[in-house]
């Protein structure tokens, strides 16, 4: 972004990569997939890079409002300095925080999640499921991230990205507003779970196994980690692939 | 004449007692912190009409929804019949609406009887479901002792009331056929007439049964009214204001604490002078009075149906957290605080708090903030808000977050990320491919 600003250019959209998308090896692949999509359809975009900081989501959910607001205000300063209007995020947690909680602290932006961007591009005919890997006949199920689904009522956009694949879409028994959490939200990602009978991602695995899907579509880097851990735990890595909506779109479009 | 006076005394006493106890609940709710829920009345009325009146969130469990609908509609409509009973009681009349309404009266009584039968059936089914089928939802750790018997009492009382109503009508019907006294021919009795053969044939006995059931029915209703403020059944009243004052924001959005904003702004900009609030407020909630009145209203609205707990990922996987228990604890504690005020005055402290004495930290930290409980509640109760407020107290006032979360906070403060990575590496994803 700094480079673009130095050249006096303003991107159409700012891509908010998020901490997971920046540092987590698996999530970096999602980040690159989103970039491929943006480049493919010719949307000019920028990232904040080293100027980006955590949105503060896990701090807020864990009860550290001070830290959250410090992060938020610092981020708002950076975003406003670059006169950012529109943001796409690769993470439902960043999406929810910037979209819903930053306005109260003075940060007003049009924020969309990358699944919504993909839906728009499909609607505009800019993305098709041709020329790339065919998902025809594959059993695909979609796991709703809490902060995209229940948190913000985004249920259809990610499903739209799967509908054009001509794949065999199956819903898990707990889906949409009744979806089961992956177990990572509310800062659980950064601590050991409390004592119980089992971990939440393993409970979610029962739904996945029951759906008999060979591809699990995710739309959140945290869900991605939890679902993959679940698959590994069940020794199903050969049979079940966990892919982000963006990665599926990239593959289907041969990008 | 004596019965009229007796009736008026009982009625007045019941209304007085109920108002007194309902006012106490109201007082307790208002012990909470302020929260502004006065915006957008149009949408609020719509939400109430849809969710409380229209029962739209009940349908997620169709069987329970249908059964509950019988009881709900029965309750509302049978109140018309109760109105007649009240008037008859005060003026010493008998079926006062029978003459002026004519054939319509027969139709109404028929409708009431069918509803009474449906209510009766639903209550028997619910009673069996709770005590014979042992549904998991009703047998959580918090559903023993009083919560368990409370539910059973409610169902048994409703069964008794409906039985009395139908028996009363049957006796009345038989007396009408005998052309006895003031029992004018009124009403068709499509349900209770089936009970006729079970009743004696003597007019005197029938009159005793009719009067007995009449008094039992109306005193039962008044007693039940007075049971409400002590029971989870209070939801029949509070469901309406509770949905009206619902959170209208998206579920993912948590409140931004204004008290923190001032301090953070002052930290970032030394020239900023935060508004000084008169009373130093506690960050987050340690006790019920740190919660908002809406949180407390929700606690009194909760009818312990357990839909929240049954979808809670933490609870499903055997963790200690149960959103229903959070609401029940909150209600139990605010009731205790209220009772302390009544007994010992406003400034009395019993050295107990919602945190630790009722809700443990283990419960609080098990929550994934997934909003499943919030979504599942048929009357828009938000247990997550209470959990978040209590986490805020534990973290900001006590600095007692779990160690791993403290590490995360540290990383975020120093590196701008929850993990220990250097901010300089934020663009590394570009290089690898």
Image (tube, coloured by chain):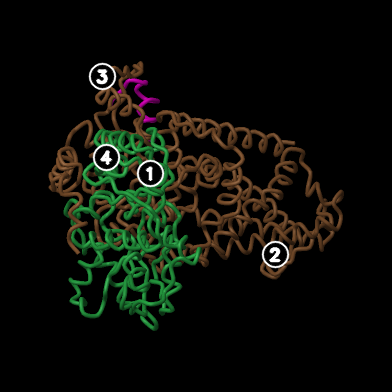
Do the residues indicated by labels 2 and 1 lie within the same chain of the protein? no
Q: Tell me which residue sits at (31%, 19%) in the image.
A: B272
Q: Earlier in the sequence, mark 3 or mark 2?
A: 2
Question: Dot 2: what SS?
Answer: helix
Picture colour for chain A: green
Q: Name the chain under label 1.
A: A
Res A10 label: 1
Within-10-Å neighbours for mark 4: few <14, some 14–19, many 20+: many
Residue B378: percent from the left, percent from the top? 49, 53
- Residue at the far bottom: name it: A137
Q: Name the chain under label 3.
A: B
Residue A44: percent from the left, percent from the top? 38, 53
Do the residues indicated by labels 1 and 3 lie within the same chain of the protein? no
Residue at which label 2 appears: B192
- Res B179 quadrant in image: bottom right
Q: CA distance from mark 2 to mark 4?
A: 59 Å
Do the residues indicated by labels 3 and 2 lie within the same chain of the protein? yes
Q: Name the chain under label 2.
A: B
Residue A238 in sight in this render: yes
Residue B36: percent from the left, percent from the top? 48, 31
Residue at which label 3 appears: B270
Within-10-Å neighbours for mark 2: few <14, some 14–19, many 20+: many
Asked if the residues shown at circle 3 and circle 4 are in contact, with their CB atoms under 8 angstroms apart, the answer is: no
Residue at which label 4 appears: A63
Q: CA distance from mark 1 to mark 3?
A: 32 Å
């Amino acid at each position: 972004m700094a480079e673009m600003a130095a050249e006096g250019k303003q991107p159409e959209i700012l891509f908010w990569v998020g901490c997971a998308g920046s540092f987590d090896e698996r999530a970096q692949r999602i980040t690159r997939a989103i970039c491929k999509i943006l480049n493919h359809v010719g949307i000019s975009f920028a990232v904040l890079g080293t100027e980006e900081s955590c949105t503060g989501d896990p701090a807020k959910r864990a009860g550290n409002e001070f830290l959250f607001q410090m992060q938020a205000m610092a981020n708002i300063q950076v975003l406003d300095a670059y006169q950012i209007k529109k943001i796409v995020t690769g993470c439902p947690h960043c999406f929810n925080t910037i979209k819903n909680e930053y306005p109260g602290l003075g940060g007003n932006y049009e924020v969309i999640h990358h699944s919504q961007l993909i839906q728009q591009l499909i609607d505009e005919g800019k993305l098709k499921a041709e020329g790339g890997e065919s998902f025809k006949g594959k059993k695909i199920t979609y796991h709703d991230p809490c902060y995209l689904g229940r948190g913000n009522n985004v249920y259809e956009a990610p499903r739209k990205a799967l509908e054009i694949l001509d794949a065999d879409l199956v819903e898990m028994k707990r889906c949409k507003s009744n979806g089961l959490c992956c177990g990572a939200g509310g800062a659980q990602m950064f601590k050991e779970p409390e004592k119980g009978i089992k971990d939440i991602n393993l409970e979610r695995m029962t739904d996945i196994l029951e759906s008999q899907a060979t591809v699990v579509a995710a739309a959140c880097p945290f869900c991605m980690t939890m679902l993959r851990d679940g698959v590994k735990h069940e020794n199903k890595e050969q049979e079940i692939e966990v892919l982000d909506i963006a990665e599926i779109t990239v593959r289907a479009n041969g990008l | 004449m004596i019965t009229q006076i007796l009736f008026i005394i009982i009625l007045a006493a019941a209304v007085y007692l109920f108002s007194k106890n309902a006012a106490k609940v109201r007082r307790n709710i208002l012990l909470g912190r302020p929260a502004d829920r006065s915006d957008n009345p149009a949408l609020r009325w719509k939400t109430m009409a849809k969710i409380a009146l229209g029962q739209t969130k009940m349908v997620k469990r169709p069987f329970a929804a249908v059964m509950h609908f019988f009881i709900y509609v029965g309750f509302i409509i049978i109140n018309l019949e109760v109105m007649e009973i009240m008037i008859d009681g005060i003026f010493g009349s008998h079926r006062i609406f029978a003459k002026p309404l004519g054939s319509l009266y027969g139709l109404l009584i028929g409708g009431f009887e069918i509803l009474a039968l449906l209510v009766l059936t639903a209550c028997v089914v619910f009673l069996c479901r709770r005590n014979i089928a042992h549904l998991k939802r009703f047998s959580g750790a918090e559903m023993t002792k009083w919560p368990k018997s409370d539910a059973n009492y409610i169902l048994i009382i409703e069964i008794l009331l409906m039985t009395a109503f139908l028996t009363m009508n049957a006796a009345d019907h038989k007396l009408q056929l005998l052309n006895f006294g003031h029992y004018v021919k009124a009403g068709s009795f499509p349900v209770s007439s089936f009970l006729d053969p079970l009743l004696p044939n003597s007019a005197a006995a029938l009159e005793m049964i009719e009067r007995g059931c009449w008094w039992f029915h109306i005193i039962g209703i008044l007693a039940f009214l007075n049971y409400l403020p002590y029971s989870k059944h209070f939801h029949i009243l509070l469901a309406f204001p509770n949905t009206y004052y619902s959170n209208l924001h998206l579920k993912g959005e948590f409140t931004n604490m204004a008290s923190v904003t001032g301090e953070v702004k002052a930290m970032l900009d030394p020239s900023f002078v935060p508004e000084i609030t008169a009373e130093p407020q506690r960050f987050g909630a340690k006790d019920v009075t740190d919660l908002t009145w809406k949180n407390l209203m929700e606690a009194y609205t909760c009818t312990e149906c357990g839909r929240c707990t049954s979808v809670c990922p933490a609870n499903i996987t055997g963790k200690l957290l149960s959103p229903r228990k959070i609401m029940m604890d909150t209600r139990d504690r605010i009731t205790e605080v209220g009772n302390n005020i009544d007994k010992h005055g406003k400034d009395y402290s019993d050295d107990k708090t919602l945190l630790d004495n009722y809700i443990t930290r283990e419960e609080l930290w098990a929550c994934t903030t997934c909003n499943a409980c919030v979504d599942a509640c048929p009357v828009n109760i938000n247990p997550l808000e209470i959990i978040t407020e209590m986490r805020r107290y534990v973290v900001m006032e006590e600095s007692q977050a779990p160690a791993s979360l403290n590490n995360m906070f540290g990383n975020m403060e120093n590196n701008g990320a929850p993990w220990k990575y250097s901010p300089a590496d934020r663009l590394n994803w570009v290089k690898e491919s």
